[in-house]
Image (spheres, coloured by chain):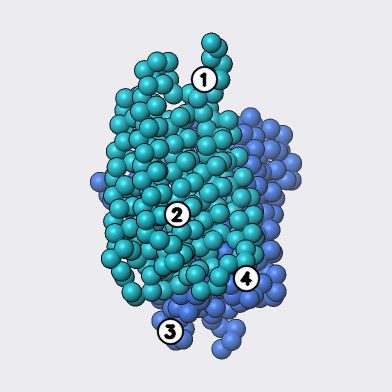
């Protein structure tokens, strides 16, 4: 019993992750008065891409081919570390939040050098932006997580997120609210959503994540899309885990509540994207420093 | 009750950080006005059930002054001077935010170590937030170029002193509080007129250019 629910959680993440971008796009379509693409569009895209072959430029090396594989496998590895719906994660040990952050760091590193490997100027620009913004987002994530860790007296994600109870929220409401706000900014930055990056844009000059993967095709591109959806799901698990204080104690009900909360988060992201414009690139570091200030504030309040 | 006051204190902290990070003058005026209104409610929250007439009077007077009269005066000033935003502050907005977090750390450290009568303070955050608001006010006065932002810094400074006063509201005489509010009112009034005159004379409200004036 102890191992079944964590395994189901990982399978849920693998299965449901491509649904989140669909929900976001549907919300945006409703806001814009369009019908929008099907909710399952990303599944269709991934299967279509998997059936195709890949084309590799003669200037690229093995790094270019390793990029998508490392990106996807690091995301799957991170999925085993994050608890969902009040139960513990498949893998849990003290300090696993650092492994969690740096698994994504590893995936990002390979995406960046794969983009540089093509020698394309556009992809180089995207890689430089990705490196810059994620370097700024990383301390924000850690400050926020350490504040939550301090409130729950645990250095493991499986100790932190299931420990959220109404009592924790009454005792440390301001700390948790600020930490969650900071992690929401990290969530938007890491997943290249508005206001940091516009996932719909087709102008290379303004893109960050999409521009780095322009030269990938076929199964490689399917891996990248799937990895990005998985990353969205996993960061969503982290955020909803902090925001959800109630655990009923009956696993199926907890799972359903948690999945509903993930869908609500996707709708919220869609609303943010529909009501806000993408920020100018020079303003993004300022926003991230602001998020860092929120995280620092929550840590200072927690240490008080 | 303590969690409620704690939350109010955190909101004031956030409004200070917002003041440090925003460049639009109208937004800054709104932030300081909101701060004033929240501070007006604070004595009602912290008076522990026995809401006396003087506490209500103090709250009403300070809400009316800081939430309505000052924003009206200052909004009129920016309309007359037709400035929208602070373009080139002495210290940039990102740096201001970072320095603000440093000041926050210092004031939390110092505020929890000040020897104070324990019964007087309702929340352990009150004194640190008071210190931080004072520091924010001083910083805005020093680091911004536009006269209007300096007035806002002065108001934030006064808000900080007011938070200190609220902690001791049951002990401090009403007349002293009302006197301080009256002083601030006169000061803002005079500063509003000053801004208007500086603007009419020089077509801008950049104070650093005043230092180059010669006889």
* Same chain? Circles 4 and 2: no
- The circle on residue B162 is 2
Q: Tell me whether circle 3 and circle 1 mark residues in contact (CB < 8 Å).
A: no
Chain to which mark 4 belongs: A
| Residue shown at 38% from the left, 50% from the top | B179
Q: Tell me whether circle 4 and circle 1 mark residues in contact (CB < 8 Å).
A: no
Quadrant containing the N terminus of chain B in the rendered view: bottom left
Question: Which of pointers 4 and 2 indicates the residue nearer the eye?
Answer: 2
- Please give the residue where the numbered disc 4 appears in the rendered image: A150
Q: Earlier in the sequence, mark 1 or mark 2?
A: 2
- The circle on residue A82 is none
- Please give the residue where the numbered disc 1 appears in the rendered image: B210
| Residue shown at 70% from the left, 38% from the top | A117
Q: Picture quarter containing residue A267?
A: bottom left
Q: Secondary structure at mark 1?
A: helix
Q: Picture quarter containing residue B58?
A: bottom left
* Residue A82 located left or right of residue A70: left
* Same chain? Circles 3 and 2: no
Q: Secondary structure at mark 4?
A: helix
Chain letter for the part of the structure drawn in blue: A
| Residue shown at 70% from the left, 43% from the top | A113
- Please give the residue where the numbered disc 3 appears in the rendered image: A248
Q: Residues under labels 1 and 2: Cα distance?
A: 31 Å
* Residue A6 located left or right of residue A169: right
Chain to which mark 1 belongs: B
Q: Residues under labels 3 and 1: Cα distance?
A: 66 Å
Q: Tell me whether circle 1 and circle 2 mark residues in contact (CB < 8 Å).
A: no
Rendering coords of residue A105 (x, y %): 67, 54
Q: Residues under labels 4 and 1: Cα distance?
A: 50 Å
Rendering coords of residue A173 (x, y %): 47, 69
Q: Secondary structure at mark 3?
A: loop
Question: Which of pointers 4 and 1 indicates the residue nearer the eye?
Answer: 1
């Amino acid at each position: 019993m102890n191992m079944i629910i964590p395994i189901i959680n990982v399978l849920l993440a693998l299965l449901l992750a491509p649904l989140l971008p669909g929900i976001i796009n549907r919300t945006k379509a409703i806001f814009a008065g369009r019908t929008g693409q099907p909710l399952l569009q990303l599944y269709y895209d991934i299967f279509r891409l998997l059936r195709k072959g890949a084309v590799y430029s003669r200037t690229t090396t093995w790094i270019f081919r390793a990029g998508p594989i490392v990106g996807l496998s690091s995301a799957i590895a991170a999925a085993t570390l994050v608890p969902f719906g009040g139960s513990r994660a498949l893998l849990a040990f003290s300090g696993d939040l650092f492994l969690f952050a740096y698994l994504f760091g590893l995936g990002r590193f390979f995406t960046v050098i794969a983009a540089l490997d093509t020698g394309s100027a556009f992809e180089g620009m995207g890689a430089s932006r990705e490196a810059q913004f994620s370097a700024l987002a990383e301390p924000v994530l850690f400050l926020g997580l350490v504040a939550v860790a301090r409130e729950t007296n645990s250095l493991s994600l499986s100790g932190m997120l299931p420990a959220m109870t109404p009592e924790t929220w009454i005792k440390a409401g301001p700390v948790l609210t600020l930490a969650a706000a900071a992690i929401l900014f990290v969530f938007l930055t890491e997943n290249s959503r508005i206001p940091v990056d516009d996932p719909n844009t087709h102008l290379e000059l303004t893109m960050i994540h999409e521009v780095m993967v322009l030269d990938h095709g076929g199964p490689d591109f399917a891996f990248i899309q799937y990895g990005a959806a998985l990353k969205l799901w996993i960061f969503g698990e982290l955020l909803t885990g902090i925001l959800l204080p109630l655990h009923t104690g009956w696993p199926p009900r907890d799972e359903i509540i948690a999945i509903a909360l993930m869908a609500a988060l996707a709708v919220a992201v869609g609303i943010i994207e529909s009501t806000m414009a993408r920020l100018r690139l020079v303003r993004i570091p300022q926003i991230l420093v602001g998020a860092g200030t929120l995280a620092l504030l929550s840590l200072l309040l927690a240490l008080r | 009750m303590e969690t409620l006051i704690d939350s109010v204190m955190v909101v004031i902290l956030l409004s200070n950080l917002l003041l440090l990070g925003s460049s639009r003058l109208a937004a800054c005026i709104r932030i300081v006005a909101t701060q004033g209104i929240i501070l007006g409610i604070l004595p009602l929250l912290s008076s522990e059930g026995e809401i006396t007439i003087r506490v209500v009077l103090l709250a009403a007077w300070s809400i009316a002054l800081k939430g309505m009269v000052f924003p009206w005066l200052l909004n009129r000033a920016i309309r007359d001077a037709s400035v929208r935003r602070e373009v080139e502050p002495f210290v940039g907005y990102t740096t201001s935010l970072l320095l603000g977090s440093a000041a926050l750390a210092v004031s939390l450290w110092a505020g929890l170590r000040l020897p104070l009568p324990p019964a007087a303070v309702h929340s352990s955050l009150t004194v640190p937030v008071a210190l931080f608001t004072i520091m924010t006010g001083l910083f805005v006065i020093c680091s911004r170029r536009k006269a209007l932002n300096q007035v806002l810094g002065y108001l934030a400074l006064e808000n900080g002193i007011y938070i200190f006063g609220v902690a001791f509201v049951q002990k401090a005489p009403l007349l002293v509080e009302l006197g301080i509010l009256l002083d601030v009112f006169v000061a803002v009034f005079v500063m509003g007129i000053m801004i208007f005159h500086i603007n009419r004379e020089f077509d801008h409200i950049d104070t650093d250019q005043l230092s180059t004036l010669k006889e």
